């Protein structure tokens, strides 16, 4: 596996897997540029300006994989704009095919390091951030590669609007504990769970990803963690 480390050192892993089919490669070359965010210039005053027709709120999904959850959310909430960050080219090709097939207009894409995107978005510009089944980096020497770190929690707090949410799903107990520890010590966030089922069960209308279904078949239960951004 080839590893890529971006400027801020927060993304590790493959950027490309199996060879793209001809139509997939065409979508990456010709459709992706129209949907892709360029963060080498100043962001708009409002992220809603990135979408046409206009949207009422903007959400971010980090590492959307095959895109099942992101696509379902975008189709269920046409008045909301969605940004999907995914450095893996094959995942990007899959979602582009669905966007084209379904004529989805409220998704923008970022093919790079989500940490750089988080630093680019205006403060208080996101209504929600989703991190669904991220790579857990289970070996202790690799824990620094996990997306959830104190600095990233601070970055999410800056990017989220008051009462916005960070939602996290994982079937890896150690990563769930890690995430809880980082968010519970963050003064800007409050864990919303009031009873065990609040984290044992998916939230209403949750779209299970292909990886999530595989985990269930193999007997691994996920935790569904929700954290609310507190007002300053």
Image: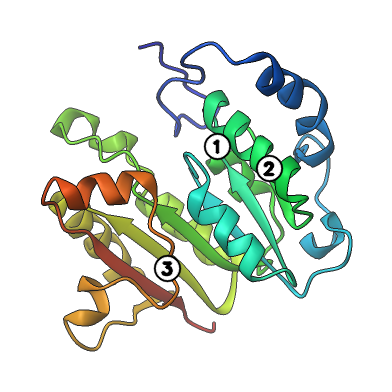
Compared to residue 24, the image places residue 61 above or below, namely below
**Rendered residue at 26%/41% (across/down):** 136
Answer with left or right where residue 204 lies relative to residue 30: left
Q: Earlier in the sequence, mark 3 or mark 1?
A: 1
Residue 109 — which label?
A: 2
Answer with left or right where residue 77 lies relative to residue 128: right
Query: On the rendered image, what quadrant is the C terminus found in?
Result: bottom right
Q: Earlier in the sequence, mark 2 or mark 1?
A: 1
**Which one is in front, 88 or 30?**
30
Asked which quadrant contains residue 24, the reply is top right
Circle 1: element type: loop
Where's residue 231, x and y in %? 53, 84
Compared to residue 40, the image places residue 102 above or below, namely below
Answer with left or right where residue 153 lies relative to residue 103: left
| Residue furthest front in the image | 101
Find out whether the residues at labels 2 and 3 contact each other: C-beta distance under 8 Å: no
Tag in front: 3 or 1: 3
Report how far apart the C-alphas of labels 2 and 1 lie in the structure: 8 Å
Where's residue 212, x and y in %? 30, 51
Compared to residue 93, the image places residue 79 above or below, namely below
Circle 2: element type: strand
| Residue furthest bottom in the image | 194
Compared to residue 120, the image places residue 89 above or below, namely above
Q: Earlier in the sequence, mark 2 or mark 3?
A: 2
Q: Which residue is mark 3?
A: 206
Q: Which residue is mark 1?
A: 86
């Amino acid at each position: 596996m080839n590893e890529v480390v971006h400027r801020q050192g927060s993304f590790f892993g493959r950027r490309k897997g199996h060879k793209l089919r001809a139509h997939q490669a065409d979508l990456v070359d010709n459709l992706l540029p129209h949907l892709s965010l360029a963060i080498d210039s100043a962001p708009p005053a409002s992220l809603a300006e990135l979408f046409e027709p206009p949207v009422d709120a903007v959400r971010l999904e980090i590492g959307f994989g095959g895109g099942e959850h992101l696509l379902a959310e975008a189709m269920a909430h046409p008045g909301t704009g969605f940004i999907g960050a995914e450095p893996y080219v094959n995942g990007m090709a899959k979602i582009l095919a669905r966007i084209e097939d379904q004529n989805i207009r409220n998704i923008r894409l970022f093919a790079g390091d989500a940490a750089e995107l988080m630093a680019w978005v205006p403060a208080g510009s996101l209504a929600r951030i989703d991190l669904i089944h991220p790579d857990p980096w289970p070996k202790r020497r690799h824990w620094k590669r996990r997306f959830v770190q104190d600095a990233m929690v601070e970055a999410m707090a800056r990017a989220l609007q008051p009462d916005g949410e960070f939602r996290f799903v994982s079937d890896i107990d150690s990563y769930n504990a890690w995430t809880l520890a980082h968010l519970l010590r963050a003064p800007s966030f409050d864990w919303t769970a009031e009873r065990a089922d609040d984290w044992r069960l998916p939230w209403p209308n949750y779209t299970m990803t292909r990886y999530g279904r595989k985990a269930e078949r193999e007997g691994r239960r996920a935790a569904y963690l929700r954290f609310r951004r507190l007002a300053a």
